[in-house]
Image (cartoon, rainbow, N blue to C red):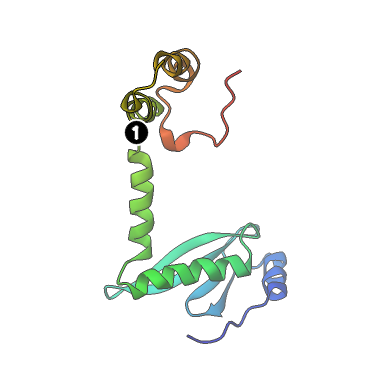
Amino acid sequence: MGHATLTALAVERAHRSGEPVLLSDGAGLYLRKQTRDGASWTLRYRFAGREHWLALGHYPDMSLAEARIEARQARVLLDKQQDPLSVRRAAEAEQRQRGSFRELCEEWYRNEITGRGLKHPEVPRRHLDKYLLPKLARTAAWMLPRRISLA
């Protein structure tokens, strides 16, 4: 693996220029700027005899240092004979398969409440049925916000 060639300043200048550009940082990592405003970090790699371009993130949301970390993680997968693109798609599919909020709640209730033989299991059940499920039951679990307001 060659040493990195880009600097944060060079990346910033290229982005500000507004011109389409493809800048190499070495080891397959590129800053790819195709439109006036948009620039993205891309990893170019070969897997199973084919060339792939893996989008890592957008600049300036993702810094050069962060892009190098993401690229390194993808290269680790390649070292293990795993295609980073397939790994990402599988993770996204798994997120979508997690089911509805209701399914998560019911699983939690079975495992944490019923399974423990609590003295008053109807209390959390009542809270689920009264506050959480009417608002969120059919929401896909992966779409739920980190914090939920029940007001």
How packed is label 1: few (under 14 Cα within 10 Å), some, or many (20 or more)? some
Quarter residue 54 falls in: bottom left
The image shows residue 49, relative to residue 110, as above or below, that is below
Q: Quadrant of residue 47?
A: bottom left
- Work out whether 111 lies above or below 134: below
Q: Which residue is mark 1?
A: 99
Query: Which amino acid type corresponds to the residue marked 1 in the rendered image?
Result: Gly
Say which residue appears at 42% left-offset and 34% top-offset.
Answer: 141
SS category of the residue bearing label 1:
loop
Image location (x, y in percent) of residue 114: 33, 23
Q: Position of residue 53 (x, y in %)?
A: 42, 67
Rendered residue at 72%/71% (across/down): 13
Q: Nearer the viewer, residue 5 or 78?
A: 78
In this image, 71 relative to 113: left or right?
right
Q: Is residue 32 visible?
A: no
Residue 75 position in % (x across, y down): 42, 73
Name above or below for residue 126 compared with residue 78. above
In percent of width and height, residue 101 lies at: 41, 28
Q: Residue at x 63, y 64 (%)?
A: 63
Q: Is residue 25 visible?
A: yes
Quadrant that contains the C terminus: top right
Left or right: where 150 falls relative to 91: right
Task: Please give left or right for residue 66 compared with residue 131 in the image.
Answer: right
Q: How many marks?
A: 1
